[in-house]
Amino acid sequence: MMERKLEILSRREILTKSLPTLVLVAALVEVDIGKGEAQQKMAQKLVQYQETPKKDQHCSICLHFVPPGGCKLVDGGINPNGWCALFAPKPRSSWRRAAGDWATMSRVWHLQKKTTL
């Protein structure tokens, strides 16, 4: 008979390994508030938002980014050079436009952030 070895995971390992799945499920669940109302946006902390890019992934080339500093899925001000776990790249044809507008969007975002502080 073949013997199976069971791996015992710590609570921290279980949470760390399941976090990406939980974030994806949370993003896909639609909150049905009522007719004509927009879907509720997620908190930046929940989607691991950071104001710096992750490798070559940044908000200005994300499908969900709304220039100059917004997002369809994440609440609050968004840096065009930021990143979150919901990153989904735009089709390549729109990258050139997004990359050209990045400097302008970044300046506008920083100005908006200074005025709201």
Image (cartoon, helix red, strand yellow):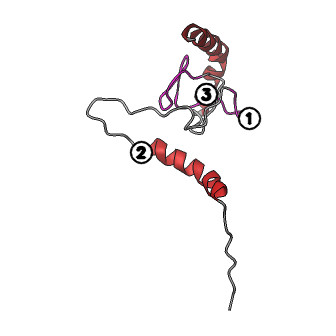
- Describe the element under mark 3 as helix, strand or loop: helix
Q: What residue did someone put label 1 on?
A: 55
Q: Residue at the far left: name it.
A: 35
Residue that badge 3 annotates? 59
- Spatial distance from mark 2 to mark 3, Cα to Cα? 22 Å
Label 3: few (<14), some (14–19) or many (≥20) C-alpha neighbours in 10 Å: many
Residue 100, x across and y down, in percent? 66, 17
Image point (64%, 51%), residue name: 16
Which three-letter amino acid code belongs to the residue tagged 2?
Val
**For the residue carrying disc 1, how many other residues have a C-alpha within 10 Å: few (<14), some (14-19), or many (20+)?**
few
Q: Which residue is mark 2?
A: 29
How many angstroms separate mark 1 from mark 2 (CA)?
28 Å
Identify residue type, mark 1. Answer: Lys
Q: Quadrant of the N terminus?
A: bottom right
- In the displayed orientation, state which residue is furthest to the bottom: 1
The secondary element bearing badge 2 is classed as loop
Residue found 68% across the figure and 70% down from its top: 7
Compared with 35, 30 (above or below) is below
Q: Main secondary structure of the magenta part?
A: loop
Indicate the quadrant where residue 56 lies.
Answer: top right
On whether residue 70 falls in the magenta region, the answer is yes
Q: Which residues are magenta?
A: 52-78
The image shows residue 103 at horizontal and vertical percentages of: 67, 14
For residue 83, which quarter of the picture? top right
Inter-mark Cα distance, 1 to 3: 12 Å
Give the residue type that dot 3 points to.
Cys
Q: Nearer the viewer, residue 9 or 65?
A: 9
Say which residue appears at 48% left-offset and 34% top-offset: 42
Question: Image quadrant of residue 33?
Answer: top left
Residue 94 coordinates in the image, percent (x, y): 58, 26
